[in-house]
Image (cartoon, rainbow, N blue to C red):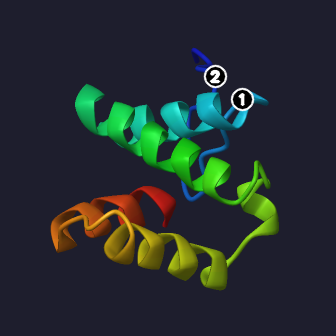
Amino acid sequence: MTSYPNKVKDNATFRPSSLRLTDQVVEVLRYHHYGKRTEQAYVRWINNYIYFHHKQHPKEMGKTEIEAYLSHLAVEKNVAASTQNQAFNALA
């Protein structure tokens, strides 16, 4: 039997092999067959979110930080609802 790295067996969960957050995000998105442009957009939203919160790691943040970021996008950046939804989906 051939063994494939990161191959999900039965009901196991997928675990990215990379240590860098951006690489992990890309790995998970590719595993789920997201498009290249979606991958790029999600990485950009995640990076913007991290910089908005002064380079705090997303693992240390939660619902209130996501709400603050989405409110910032709506109120200060005047983004459309669909843009907010894309940002939310990238962070969820």
Name the residue: 44% across, 79% down. Answer: 71
SS label for mark 2: loop
Foreground of the two, 30 or 12? 30
How far across and down, in percent of the image, does residue 61 sit? 74, 70
Question: What is the distance, in whole Å, between disc 2 and disc 1 at their CAs?
Answer: 9 Å
Foreground of the two, 74 or 65? 74
Foreground of the two, 45 or 27? 45
Name the residue: 40% across, 44% down. Answer: 42
Name the residue: 34% across, 39% down. Answer: 41
Looking at the rendered image, the disc whose residue lies closer to the viewer, 2 or 1, is 1
How far across and down, in percent of the image, does residue 13 sit? 61, 54
Are circles 2 and 1 on residues that touch, CB within 8 Å? yes
Foreground of the two, 45 or 8? 45
Instruction: Report crowding for label 1: few under 14, some 14 to 19, many 20 or more residues within 10 A (C-alpha).
Output: few
Residue type at numbered disc 1: Ser
Whether residue 42 is visible, yes or no, is: yes
Q: Residue furthest top?
A: 2
Task: In the rendered view, tell whether residue 5 sits above or below residue 11.
Answer: above
Q: Identify the mark nearer the N-term, 2 or 1.
A: 2
Residue 50 shown left or right of residue 83 in the figure: right
SS label for mark 1: loop
How far across and down, in percent of the image, does residue 1 sit? 58, 18
Q: Which quadrant of the figure has residue 30?
A: top left
Label 2: which residue? Answer: 5
Specify the label residue 17 is tagged with. 1
Count all numbered tags in the image, as a single digit. 2
